[in-house]
């Protein structure tokens, strides 16, 4: 059998490449002797998230329908007896000493760890316990902000109040943070937002817990037996694509062995329905992502062999209130929507990019 939860180990190394008249010079990173502005620029490039990840997170946030907290407008803030350092290295949970997943109470300036989950993972729970301790004293200090997510455009804000107990918006966040000496215009993101964590959790969910993880399974990998990565509740789309790719007529139309559909995409492959369909069909039905399996394969879970149809998903779902979201959907309804999209895209292409008839 094989372990369906196994993952390839990915090791990343970074180099700064300098080109001059003498040729190319590679500088291994990190390099402490580089000018600060160069180091900051390099870090910004390394930390930059691709458009597909930004799109996933933005869609997830939009689905949450966050509302302004009822406590934000008249939030109680005690006199500032200290200023909060803008340097993440100076932050730690004041109750347990944790240095990750830290939340600042906007009312009294207490820094505490995030919630502890049922399985023991998560934060130190210091922020929630502090709120409960203060509430027992008669103080209502419900709003906390995740320190590592503060940027000029906002931050994660949570309300512990019993009548909210959820992520919220704080229209006066910049003002509330300034009270504790934090200038949002000078802050840079240093930790994942809850939306990013939710997307990652959804994509990396251990399906082995509900599949046949305790049985002898045989690894299968060949053209026509290639999986699609779950992009966050995208099983309905993946199911529809697998079904279509298994139909010989559809495969013959869109396998596109000479990439003619992709080359002829006048608006670019990313924006062309036929080209995107050909790209996914080719990936599923050829050997590009299905090299022969060895007796004891060591590349199961290799990112280089993963099919992530993010561009296809964004294009087909664009403008649709449901299929453009990260919510679960009905596969049959998606199939109808997809076939309608294909029909509209095929009509002007018959006899030119596609065979007539």
Image: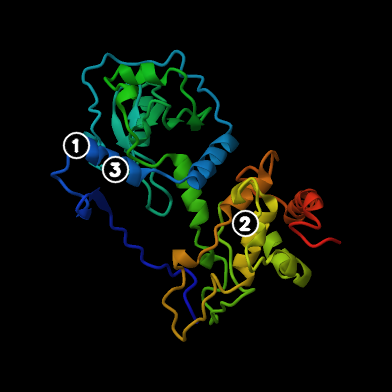
Q: Which residue is drawn at 66% across and 42% down?
A: 318
Q: Residue at x 37, y 21 (%)?
A: 139
Q: Which of marks 1 and 3 is nearer the N terminus?
A: 1
- Callout 3: few (<14), some (14-19), or many (20+) C-alpha neighbours within 10 Å? few
- Callout 1: few (<14), some (14-19), or many (20+) C-alpha neighbours within 10 Å? few
Above or below: residue 39 compared with residue 244 = above
SS at mark 3?
helix
Q: Which of marks 3 and 2 is nearer the N terminus?
A: 3
Relative to the observer, which residue lies in front, 82 or 27? 27
SS at mark 2?
helix
Q: Which residue lies furthest to the bottom in this view?
A: 295
Residue 36: mark? 1
**Quadrant, the C terminus:** bottom right
**Where residue 93 sits in the image (x, y, percent)?**
26, 37
Label 2 sits on residue: 263
Q: Residue at x 58, y 56 (%)?
A: 309
Q: Which quadrant of the view contains residue 33?
A: top left
**Where residue 351 sits in the image (x, y, percent)?**
81, 58
Q: Please state which of the two labelled residues, at mark 1 or mark 2, is closer to the viewer.
A: 2
SS at mark 1?
helix
Relative to the observer, which residue lies in front, 167 or 119? 167
Distance in Å between CA atoms under marks 1 and 3: 10 Å
Distance in Å between CA atoms under marks 3 and 2: 35 Å
Label 3 sits on residue: 43
Q: Which residue is drawn at 43% across and 27% down?
A: 153
**Where residue 312 sits in the image (x, y, percent)?**
62, 52
Relative to the observer, which residue lies in front, 85 or 158? 85
């Amino acid at each position: 059998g094989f372990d369906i939860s196994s993952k390839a180990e990915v090791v990343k190394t970074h180099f700064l490449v300098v080109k001059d008249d003498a040729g190319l010079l590679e500088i291994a990173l990190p390099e402490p002797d580089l000018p600060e502005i160069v180091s900051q620029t390099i870090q910004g490039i390394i930390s930059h998230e691709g458009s597909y990840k930004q799109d996933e997170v933005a869609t997830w946030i939009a689905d949450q329908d966050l509302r302004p907290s009822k406590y934000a407008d008249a939030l109680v803030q005690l006199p500032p007896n200290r200023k909060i350092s803008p340097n993440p290295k100076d932050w730690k949970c004041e109750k347990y000493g944790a240095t990750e997943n830290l939340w600042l109470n906007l009312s009294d300036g207490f820094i505490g760890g995030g919630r502890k989950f049922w399985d023991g993972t998560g934060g130190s729970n210091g922020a929630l316990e502090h709120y409960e301790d203060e509430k027992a004293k008669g103080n209502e200090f419900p709003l906390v902000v995740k320190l590592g997510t503060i940027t000029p455009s906002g931050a994660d804000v949570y309300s512990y109040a019993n009548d909210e107990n959820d992520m919220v918006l704080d229209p006066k966040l910049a003002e509330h943070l300034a009270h504790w000496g934090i200038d949002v215009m000078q802050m840079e993101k240093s930790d994942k937002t809850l939306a990013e964590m939710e997307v990652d959790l959804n994509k990396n969910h251990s399906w082995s817990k509900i599949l046949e993880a305790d049985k002898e399974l045989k690894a299968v990998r060949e053209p026509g037996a290639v999986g699609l990565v779950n992009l966050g509740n995208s099983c309905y789309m993946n199911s529809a694509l697998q079904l279509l790719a298994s139909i010989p007529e559809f495969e013959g139309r869109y396998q596109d062995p000479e990439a003619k559909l992709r080359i002829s995409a006048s608006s670019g492959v990313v924006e062309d329905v036929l080209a995107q369909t050909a790209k996914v069909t080719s990936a599923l039905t050829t050997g590009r992502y299905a090299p022969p399996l060895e007796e004891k394969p060591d590349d199961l879970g290799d990112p280089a062999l993963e099919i992530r149809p993010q561009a296809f998903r964004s294009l087909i779902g664009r403008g649709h209130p449901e299929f453009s979201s990260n919510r679960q959907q009905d596969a049959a309804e998606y199939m109808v929507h997809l076939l309608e999209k294909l029909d509209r895209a095929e009509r002007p292409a018959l006899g030119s990019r596609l065979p007539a008839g």
